[in-house]
């Protein structure tokens, strides 16, 4: 989910509310897209493994993203 590889139709972006800051952008996009009933598709992406580094996400980011998802789920 936190790959950064996302694509949207312009009409979709015009109709969803994005209020994310930081790593929770992807969860915000996903939650809003699902709430509005838009179709979601997965498209394979070929990429090279990161050299000399690791993921920038930390455990605490995962907790924050999870809490954001719960909040989005029950927000009207």
Image (spheres, grey):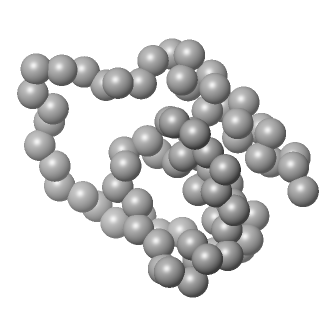
- Could you say which quadrant of the image residue 21 lies in? top right
Q: In the image, what residue occupies the spot 41% across and 68% down?
A: 7
- Residue at image x 70%, y 36%? 68
Task: Please state the horizontal and vertical placement of residue 45, each as a whole percent of the image.
Answer: 24, 58
The part of the image, by quadrant, that contains residue 67 is top right
Where does residue 55 sit, x and y in percent of width and height?
31, 25
Q: Position of residue 30 (x, y in %)?
A: 60, 56
Which quarter of the rendering shows the C terminus? Answer: bottom right
**76 with respect to 34 (left or right):** right
Residue that protrudes farthest toward the top in the picture: 59
Residue drawn at x 52%, y 48% is: 26
Q: Is residue 22 above or below residue 62?
A: below
Q: Which residue is found at the position 61% from the left and 77% from the top?
A: 14
Image height of 46 relative to 12, above or below: above
Q: Indicate left or right for 2 with 45 as reference.
A: right
Percent across and percent down for residue 42 are 41, 64
- Looking at this view, is 66 or 9 the one in front? 9
Q: With 76 as the anchor, is 26 left or right in this view? A: left
Location of residue 70 by image quarter: top right
Q: Is residue 37 visible?
A: yes
Q: Is residue 47 placed above or below 7 in the rendered structure?
A: above
């Amino acid at each position: 989910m936190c790959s950064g590889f996302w694509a949207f139709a312009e009409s979709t972006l015009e109709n969803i509310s994005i209020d994310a800051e930081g790593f929770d952008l992807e969860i915000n996009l996903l939650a809003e897209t699902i709430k509005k009933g838009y179709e979601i598709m997965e498209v394979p992406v070929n990429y090279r493994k990161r050299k000399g580094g690791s993921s920038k996400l930390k455990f605490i980011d995962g907790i924050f993203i999870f809490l954001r998802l719960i909040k989005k789920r029950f927000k009207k």
